[in-house]
Amino acid sequence: MTNEEIQFIVRTTKLVAERIQAAGEIYSGHLYGDLLDVMSFDAYKAAVHSLKSGGLVTEMPGHLLVWRGIPKGK
């Protein structure tokens, strides 16, 4: 994996995290719809998976993503 690929993964995961954190909760399809111009669906799925694995996000029924990490502004 190149340095550029690693930087892309970090940037996309940070962007997805910031959007979920700002909303508090958001449907995955709505969030991806907002981001499809800046990342592929595979990159989006990988970012969400990383956030879920890290305990920052929980996916509820209906693909509702709920922020569980640090509250915004703290």
Image (spheres, grey):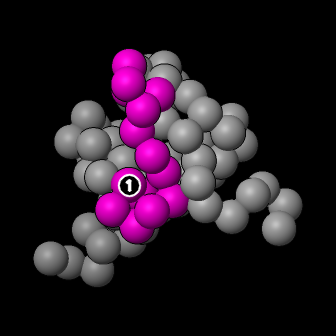
Position of 10 with respect to 18 (left or right) is left
Instruction: Report how many numbered discs are placed on residues in the image.
Output: 1
> Among all residues in the image, which is located at the extreme front?
61
Q: Residue at position x 65%, y 48% from top?
A: 21
Q: Residue at position x 20%, y 78% from top?
A: 2
**14 or 58, which is in the foreground?**
58
**30 or 58, which is in the foreground?**
58
Q: Residue at position x 55%, y 40% from top?
A: 66
Residue 24 falls inside the magenta stretch: no
The quarter of the rendered structure image containing the N terminus is bottom left
| Residue 24 image offset from top left, x and y in percent | 67, 39
User: Mark 1 — residue?
Assistant: 52
Element marked by disc 1? helix
| Residue 53 image offset from top left, x and y in percent | 33, 62
Badge 1 density bin: few <14, some 14–19, many ≥20, Cα 10 Å: some
**43 or 64, which is in the foreground?**
64
| Residue 50 image offset from top left, x and y in percent | 34, 60
Magenta segment boundaries in residue numbering: 51-64
Q: Vertical placement of 61 versus 45: above or below?
A: above
| Residue 49 image offset from top left, x and y in percent | 30, 52
The quarter of the rendered structure image containing the C terminus is bottom right
